[in-house]
Image (tube, rainbow, N blue to C red):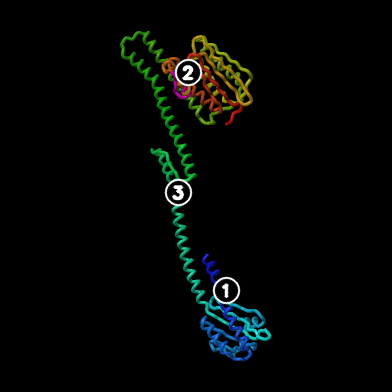
């Protein structure tokens, strides 16, 4: 940049100086022509003007006549000498020349003089003037430009440093928070600075929230599991201890207590089986076995298996299927899901009640409806029944062998098939579960 500025300045300054010299010379040229100086006439006026010009510019003025002889030299050293140079010859042929010698810093101009009568070139005036002023100006400008450049560089560096600090600060916060997540601190971050980092922070906070929720739910699940698994064991311990505490226990009491202990063992077993089913449902796709399955047959089988249980309380199980349905499903998981719904229909029913299952299909989904004539679910409990270990009436549910995991398993199975499940219920009247599952499985 500095080189460009300087060469621009220099060429302009030289041009200006040459123009100025040119106009000032014109007066002398007129005087030379009028006086016939080139033809041997002496003229004080011409001498005076030339001397003035030379001293004004601290330069040198030479006049050469048509014989290439120097007739005037303000330095008085080359008078009467012959000068033949390229510039001189060219000037005689009518071409003015202006030469700037940058290295030695002077400007030389050769200008033709014209005969006052014929108008033809009859001599040449050579003016050479030092151009120290241009050099000085150039040095001054060079200094200024250098200073400006230095200030600009410092300014740019300063701004870059400041901006980079502001821009990287939010990332520092995010990094810090990410490190904290690995430890104990799980505070949300707040970054009000820029859209990009703000969006990043928001996404991060959402992730943190989800992680926290997952962690809370995991902890709750673990404590529920421990509690549920401990309950039967506590009962067994109490039963066994009370037998041991007495001497001569009658055989009938032993039998009664042992029956109770066996029931508790069954219960423990059921909880563990349900827990394992639930864990399997939660596992990712590696454990999924999708096959084209006849859904009518699948439901028939479920009902066939459960009919004897229903029969113990005179509960009738009926299937109503409108069309044959073939769908891509995981047979084991879907069987478990439907079994749980029908089992609940029986468990939470009245003596002599019914459970109706219906199957329907359109071009995208198949629909299973499980309707019962049972006790119903209170409205405020309906949103919780799919939660793990949730039971509306703990004692009642326990009495009839519920673990509170059945609907959680069903829901996981349905979601695994990218389906949906809904419940409609009225206390004392009955409950209806509807399940919708796509015919084609999408991994
Ligand atoms: P459980 O093993 O206790 O049956 P579920 O997860 O299958 O657990 O069901 C959760 C709770 O929802 C049950 O304890 C019961 O209170 C209620 N429930 C589920 N299905 C029905 C139904 N068909 N009728 C009435 N209540 C039901």
Q: In the rendering, which numbered label is found on residue 124?
A: none
At horizontal 68% and vertical 85% (from top left) the residue drawn is 118
State the image coordinates of residue 2 (x, y, percent, origin top left): 51, 66
Residue identified by numbered label 3: 168
Magenta range:
384-392
State the image coordinates of residue 392 (x, y, percent, origin top left): 44, 19
Q: CA distance from mark 1 to mark 2?
A: 103 Å
Residue identified by numbered label 2: 377
Determine whether the residue tagged by mark 2 lies in a helix, strand or loop.
Answer: loop
Viewer can see residue 432: yes
Viewer can see residue 343: no
At horizontal 53% and vertical 20% (from top left) the residue drawn is 433
At horizontal 47% and vertical 67% (from top left) the residue drawn is 144
Q: Is mark 2 within 8 Å of ligand 1?
A: yes
Q: Quadrant of residue 86?
A: bottom right
Residue identified by numbered label 1: 15
From the viewer's perspective, is residue 233 above or below residue 178?
Answer: above
Q: Earlier in the sequence, mark 1 or mark 3?
A: 1
Pointer 1 with pointer 2, Cβ within 8 A: no
Determine whether the residue tagged by mark 3 lies in a helix, strand or loop.
Answer: helix
């Amino acid at each position: 940049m500095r080189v460009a500025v300087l060469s621009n300045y220099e060429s302009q300054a030289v041009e200006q100086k040459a123009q100025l010299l040119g106009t000032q010379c014109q007066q002398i040229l007129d005087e030379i022509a009028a006086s016939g100086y080139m033809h041997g006439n002496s003229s004080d006026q011409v001498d005076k003007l030339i001397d003035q010009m030379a001293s004004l510019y601290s330069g040198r003025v030479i006049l050469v006549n048509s014989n290439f002889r120097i007739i005037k030299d303000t330095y008085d050293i080359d008078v009467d000498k012959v000068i033949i140079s390229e510039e001189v010859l060219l000037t005689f042929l009518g071409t003015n020349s202006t030469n700037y010698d940058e290295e030695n810093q002077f400007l030389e101009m050769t200008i033709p003089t014209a005969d006052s009568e014929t108008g033809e070139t009859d001599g040449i005036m050579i003016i050479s003037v030092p151009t120290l002023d241009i050099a000085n100006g150039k040095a001054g400008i060079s200094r200024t430009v250098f200073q400006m450049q230095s200030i600009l560089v410092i300014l740019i560096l300063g701004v870059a440093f400041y901006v980079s600090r502001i821009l990287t600060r939010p990332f520092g916060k995010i990094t810090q928070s990410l490190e904290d997540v690995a430890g104990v601190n799980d505070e949300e971050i707040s970054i009000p600075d820029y859209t990009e980092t703000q969006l990043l922070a928001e996404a991060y906070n959402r992730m943190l929230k989800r992680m926290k929720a997952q962690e809370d739910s995991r902890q709750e699940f673990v404590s529920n599991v421990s509690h549920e698994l401990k309950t039967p064991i506590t009962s067994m311990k109490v039963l066994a201890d009370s037998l041991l505490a007495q001497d001569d226990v009658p055989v009938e009491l032993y039998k009664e207590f042992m029956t109770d202990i066996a029931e508790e063992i069954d219960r423990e077993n059921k909880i563990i089986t349900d827990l394992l089913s639930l864990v399997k449902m939660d596992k990712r796709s590696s454990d999924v076995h999708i096959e084209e399955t006849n859904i009518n047959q699948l439901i028939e089988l479920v009902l066939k298996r459960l009919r004897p249980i229903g029969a113990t309380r005179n509960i009738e199980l009926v299937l109503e299927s409108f069309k044959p349905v073939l769908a891509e499903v995981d047979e084991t998981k879907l069987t478990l899901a439907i079994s749980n719904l029908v089992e609940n229909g029986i468990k939470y029913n009245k003596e002599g009640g019914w459970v109706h299952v219906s199957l329907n299909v359109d071009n995208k989904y198949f629909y299973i409806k499980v309707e019962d004539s049972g006790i119903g679910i209170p409205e405020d409990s309906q949103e919780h029944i799919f939660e793990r270990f949730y039971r509306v009436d703990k004692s009642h549910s326990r009495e009839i062998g519920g673990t509170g995991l059945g609907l959680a398993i069903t829901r996981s199975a349905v979601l695994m098939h990218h389906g949906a499940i809904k419940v409609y219920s009225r206390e004392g009247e009955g409950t209806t579960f509807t399940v919708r599952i796509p015919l084609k499985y999408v991994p």
